Image: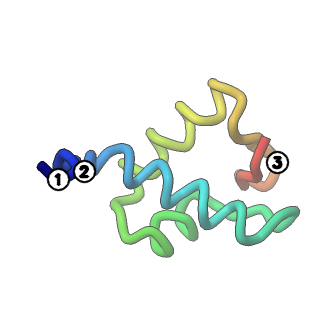
Amino acid sequence: MGAPLRRRSPPTDRVIALLDVLAARPGQPLTSSELARRVDITRTTCHSLLMTLADAGYLVRDPRSKTYTLG
């Protein structure tokens, strides 16, 4: 008997993709529009995910420049 099949979770994949983009550019803040474009998701979805990650302390949002970096 082989390893069990693992189902992918698209919402989780989106979160991981956002974190990967930010981790690849430490110290280089990105806007939600830039992140949405790089991850190929809608700006609305991206904004929602970013706000959740920021509220949880995984990201830091600069309110002046409206950019995000890893927290």
Residue type highlighted by circle 2: Arg
Q: Secondary structure at mark 2?
A: loop
Residue type highlighted by circle 3: Arg
Residue for point 46% across, 73% down? 37
The residue that label 1 is drawn on is 2
Query: Please, which residue is most extreme toward the right here?
Result: 27
Comparing 35 with 12, the one in front is: 12
Residue 17 lies, in percent from the top left, at 49, 60
Q: Residues within 10 Å of mark 2 (few under 14, many from 20)?
A: few
Image quadrant containing the C terminus: top right
The residues tagged by marks 1 and 3 sit, at their Cα atoms, a distance apart of 52 Å
Residue 52 lies, in percent from the top left, at 53, 31
Mark drawn on residue 8: 2
Q: Where 27 sits versus 62, above or below?
A: below
The residues tagged by marks 1 and 2 sit, at their Cα atoms, a distance apart of 18 Å
Query: Please, which residue is most extreme toward the left here?
Result: 1
Q: Where 68 sits versus 52, above or below?
A: below
Comparing 8 with 5, the one in front is: 5
The residue that label 3 is drawn on is 64
Residue for point 77% across, 41% down? 60
> In the drawing, does residue 14 fall left or right of residue 20?
left
